[in-house]
Image (spheres, grey):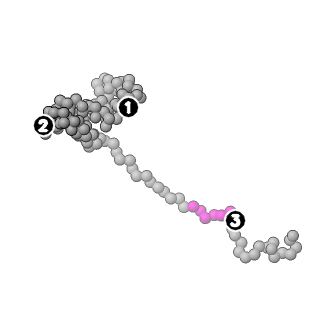
């Protein structure tokens, strides 16, 4: 297999997967398709770039591979290439680190401890 065909295959897998998973399509056709699939297997498949790229890579691996062993190796390779392209081109920002502010607590107490012996213990008139 030539490197040229591997590159073309990776680009095709990425483009079709990205189109089905993230784009609206002409006249919002792909948005409606994703809404029609609902929350079942097909809906979950169209929501996950990684899952969808595996299945999009199957026909490309079959078309580009010369034998069964090459096709089986090409299948995850094309999917991985598409996933790498998605990670490189994704505009998802890294969430900022969590900020922690420590508040100073007041050292006010309701009752302060008296020093020495209590007055009641020393007073013989108190029962």
Query: Mark 3 — residue?
Result: 111
Q: Position of residue 92 (x, y in %)?
A: 33, 42
Secondary element at image label 3: loop
Whole-Å distance between the Cαs marked 1 and 3? 61 Å
Query: Mark 2 — residue?
Result: 1
| Residue 58 is a magenta residue | no
| Residue 108 is a magenta residue | yes
User: Which one is earlier in the sequence, the residue at label 3 or at label 2?
Assistant: 2
**Looking at the rendered structure, which numbered label has been put on residue 120?**
none
Residue at position x 61%, y 64% from top?
A: 107
Tell me the quarter of the picture where residue 37 sits: top left
Residue at position x 28%, y 24% from top?
A: 26
Instruction: Tell me how many marks there are.
Output: 3
User: Which one is earlier in the sequence, the residue at label 2 or at label 1?
Assistant: 2
Q: Which residues are magenta?
A: 105-111
Q: Residues within 10 Å of mark 2 (few under 14, many from 20)?
A: few
Q: Residues within 10 Å of mark 3 (few under 14, many from 20)?
A: few
Discs 3, 2 touching: Cβ within 8 Å: no
* Nearer to us in this view, 62 or 6: 62
108 left or right of 32? right
Q: Position of residue 95 (x, y in %)?
A: 38, 47
Is any part of residue 57 visible from this angle? Answer: yes
Tell me the quarter of the picture where residue 54 sits: top left
Whole-Å distance between the Cαs marked 2 and 1? 33 Å
* Nearer to us in this view, 74 or 86: 74
Residue at position x 86%, y 75% from top?
A: 124
Quadrant of the rendering where the N terminus is positioned: top left
Is any part of residue 82 visible from this angle? Answer: no
Quadrant of the rendering where the C terminus is positioned: bottom right
Query: Mark 1 — residue?
Result: 44
Secondary element at image label 2: loop
């Amino acid at each position: 297999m030539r490197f040229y065909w591997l590159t073309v295959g990776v680009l095709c897998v990425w483009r079709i997967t990205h189109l089905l998973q993230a784009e609206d399509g002409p006249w919002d056709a792909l948005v409606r398709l994703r809404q029609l699939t609902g929350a079942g297997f097909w809906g979950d498949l169209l929501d996950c770039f990684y899952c969808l790229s595996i299945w999009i890579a199957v026909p490309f691996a079959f078309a580009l591979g010369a034998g069964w062993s090459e096709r089986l190796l090409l299948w995850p390779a094309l999917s991985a290439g598409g996933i790498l392209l998605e990670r490189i081109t994704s505009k998802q920002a890294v969430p900022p680190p969590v900020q922690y502010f420590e508040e100073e607590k007041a050292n006010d107490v309701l009752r302060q401890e008296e020093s020495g012996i209590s007055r009641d213990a020393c007073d013989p008139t108190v029962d």
